[in-house]
Amino acid sequence: MKLSTRGRYGLRAMIDLAIHDQGDYVTLGSIAQRQKISLNYLEHSFAALKNAGLIRGMSGSQGGYRLAAPPSAITIRQVLEVLEGDLSIVGSDGSQEESPYARHVRNMVWDKMDKKIDEVLSGLTLADMAAEFSRLQP
Amino acid sequence: MKLSTKGKYAVEAMCCLAVNCEEGPKKVRELSDKTGITEGYLEQLFFRLRKAGLLTTVRGQKGGYLLARSAGEITVGEILRAVEGELVPVVCIRDPSLCQSAMAPQCATRPVWTKLAAAIDAVADGVTLSSLAQSFPKEEVG
């Protein structure tokens, strides 16, 4: 089980945005530079985050991005769900018929894991992460 | 973020074996019939599970696979690690030196991944095969 680069980099960029969003639009270039992530890579992620309504974008020379809500109102779960898609630990098999064993393991194990993962990610906001980042600065 | 099919099928197969192995060793064909997992896939998984000391084989006509230990001593976490390797969502959790980012010393996201890994481990290590077998709906045994 692995979290993708898209999820990891995108979250770091959102934390950076939360820190630097002080009323002005923040350019994606400045986020890419500070976080040492390729701009090209971030453009895709930020388009998705904007579509999901987590950030607002403005084009033009004064343009860039801002959070669509206060950092304390945006959870890590919301961000990762946009970047990673469905966060459940095993995908639903769709139309495929589950064996009684598969159903039982799903009820007893995977659903419990999903619930715990959800608790962790819903319990953390961009504000928490920004505070953590500031704490780590030299 | 997904567990591989390997991990999912390995737990299902071990659950099936735990439910059904009281009357003796089970053949791959029987387990395949019950779980819907192909025999070839089961053989691959069982090779790893045997290497990890979770399964044993019994030779002969009545032979097949058995749990290597009592079901109460085998956890879902052990099964998953045997076929998936580490359960961590991001490699840096077990070994920070695996992070290639220039930002590693100021990484604010690693604590999230650490918490995520702890949550996944807690569930995986808290469920034993005996608890899975005991809670398996009786009318579905077969």
Image (tube, coloured by chain):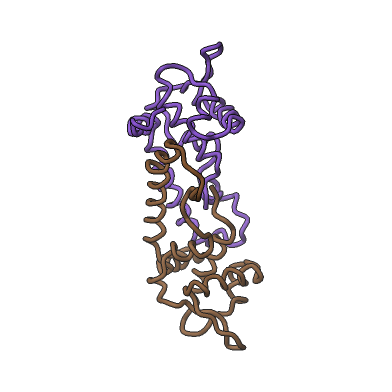
Chain colours: A brown, B purple
- The image quadrant of residue A59 is bottom right
Q: Position of residue A110 (x, y in %)?
A: 42, 45
Asked whether A136 or A4 is in front, the reply is A4
Q: Is A14 rendered above or below residue A62?
A: above
Residue at position x 49%, y 60% from top? B109
Count all numbered tags in the image, as a single digit: 0
| Residue A35, image x, y percentages | 58, 68
Residue drawn at the location 44% of the way across and 30% of the way down: B16
Q: Is residue B142 left or right of residue B64?
A: left
The answer to whether any part of residue B122 appears in the image is no
Question: Where is A88 relative to B9, above or below?
Answer: below
Of B70 and B101, the residue lying toward us = B70
Most extreme residue toward the top, as rendered? B60
* Residue B33 percent location from the top left of the image: 51, 29
Residue at position x 42%, y 24% from top? B20
Residue A66, can we see it? Answer: yes
Q: Residue at x 43, y 31 (%)?
A: B15
